[in-house]
Amino acid sequence: MPLPLQYSGAFMRPESTLILGLAGSGKSSVIQELKQRGQAAFDADETCCLGVWYAADGREVESMASCPDYHKTAQYLWDGKIVKELLRQVATDPTIRCTYLAGISGNAVDHASLFDKVVYLDEDAHTLYDRINGREGVLFPWRLPPADVGPLTQTVERFRGEMNAIGALAVGPGLTVPQAANAIMSYTGHPSPLNVPGVAHTI
């Protein structure tokens, strides 16, 4: 009779979790929190070659700012081969119990089936509006129209519908970064030794 798995020396593939969320929902902050807790956590925007910007004519461009009328025509897409390779490489490390990848793209939902679990950071339109308009740097050369959250509200509702359609778990709204990380780790069945309520900083 074979020994139980925990004594057999067999290596179990680490569980993988995809964390999705609209701009301003706190994906990067949560990934940093997970990293601080010793988790194998990756920000899609910082993972080499994973995401690529495309102009309306299909040309690959350096960033959305490289596209004329970029806020309407630029499209950011993930390379499925890179996503699979990242998961494959992590799966070879027997010390990793769970892998987290966070981001958003025009085709992120298409890659959800590659992961064991999918969660999304849920936030209301007013909060997203304030966070987006408060950002600075080349990655965010655009600003939303003053006091116009109507279109963003529609985007939030559409995104929630897409997430519900793929069975993603909602995390939020209104959580601090540690609280969001706690919720995600609890859902994946890998509680952190730092699993305490967080009040120090918000997403």
Image (cartoon, rainbow, N blue to C red):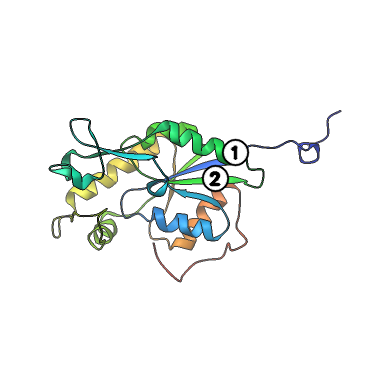
- Kind of residue sitting beneath label 1: Ala
- Badges 2 and 1: C-beta atoms under 8 Å apart? yes
Q: Is residue 64 visible?
A: yes
Residue 171: percent from the left, percent from the top? 44, 51
Look at mark 1 in the image and give the residue it sits on.
91
Residue farthest top in this picture: 1
Question: In the drawing, does residue 41 fall left or right of residue 27?
Answer: right
Give whichever of 74, 21 is nearer the camera.
Answer: 74
Residue 14: percent from the left, percent from the top? 61, 41
Residue 110 vs 48, above or below: the answer is above
What residue lies at 56% left-to-right and 38% top-to-bottom? Answer: 89
Look at mark 2 in the image and give the residue it sits on.
99
Q: Within the image, what quadrant is residue 191 found in?
A: bottom right
Q: Within the image, what quadrant is residue 68 found in?
A: top left
What residue lies at 83% left-to-right and 30% top-to-bottom? Answer: 2
Figure quadrant of the C terminus: bottom left
Tell me the element at label 2: strand
What crowding class fits label 2: few (fewer than 14 Cα within 10 Å), some (14-19), or many (20 or more)?
many
